[in-house]
Amino acid sequence: MMMFYEESSNDYGGYGQVPTPTSRREELLSGYEIYRPCTFESLKQFKKVCKTSSAALDCEVSSADGKQYVAFENVTSKNFEDIQKLREASNKTLPAMRILYDRVSEILIVKIIPGSGVFHYVATGLFIARFTRKYPIDSLVGVGATRFEGRDRAKEGDSGYKPITRTSGDAWPSLMVEVGVAGSLNQLRNDARFWLTSGGDTRVVILISINRVAKEVRFERWEDVPRVQPRGPSTPLYNPGMVQSITLEHNVQYAGPALQIPAVKVYDQGGVPPNLGANDFEFTAQDLDSFRTSYWLALQ
């Protein structure tokens, strides 16, 4: 696919090159594997599409998992504001969701959280609870599912942390957690790329992918990694990449490597607390196995 770029200081990609609206649209939709996006018509239509997608995720667990993400085109900034007001006032008439909005291409990507959200929220809650229980430090601030605004994009994650030294209310998280169902893993990975390339100083993304059929939970840690391909003069030194992958099987005790979250990336330069004691936040094999047993027990 031929791509055309315009030089800009825009936050898209964080590398000083911005795709034109046409190529930007193609990159968004292909990255999220959405080949038949909806054209936004009305709030009523938006609600209907989201509710239909949510019902499909609940009724057809194995075949519909890849449909967790839906997209709407021709969503103006005014439409987006109206959608946000609808979400705030819906009183649970809308399914739970996370959004990514691109103002240039006027595309809204919606991640539908299946059903009651139990698969989703239990995974997020258990991970964050274990993180804070093991490392009860006052130097990080939880951001939850806050929407973060770039100049051209807005996005919500599932949970995250930022150093307390980032005092601005709109300062982005350094660590973000994204949760999704297994059939949407490639789309979930695109979320990781967004956080790492959007200029907001997010340095670590933890993906939690839930296979509801095989009863497996997969963790992936994503960071910026050095490029291995030859570089041109405007090519970035780093690309987002997966640096660790761990799979927890339902009835199999986990005895593999620990999940490492580098403290030097979670904190800003020179900000790692002296009493932290280690370079990494670590989820040991025992921690991960405890997560495995607690997760599936909570869903019984």
Image (cartoon, rainbow, N blue to C red):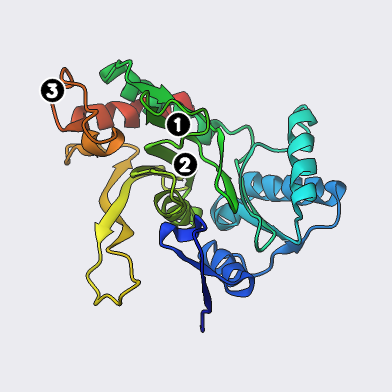
Q: In this view, does 162 lie above or below 132?
A: below
Tag 1–tag 2 contact (CB < 8 Å)? yes
Tag 3–tag 2 contact (CB < 8 Å)? no
Residue 285 tag number? none
- Nearer to us of marks 3 and 2 is 3
Label 3, label 1: how many angstroms apart (C-alpha)?
26 Å
Residue type at tag 1: Thr
Please state if 42 lies on the left or on the right of 215 as rendered. Answer: right
Looking at marks 3 and 1 on the same chain, the residue that comes earlier in the sequence is marked by 1
Residue type at tag 3: Gly
Q: Is 244 in front, or is 80?
A: 80
Name the residue beneath numbered marker 3: 277
Name the residue beneath numbered marker 2: 179
Name the residue beneath numbered marker 1: 124
Q: What element carries label 2?
A: strand
Residue type at tag 2: Val
Residue 267: image location, x then y, percent:
28, 32
Residue 88: image location, x then y, percent:
74, 30
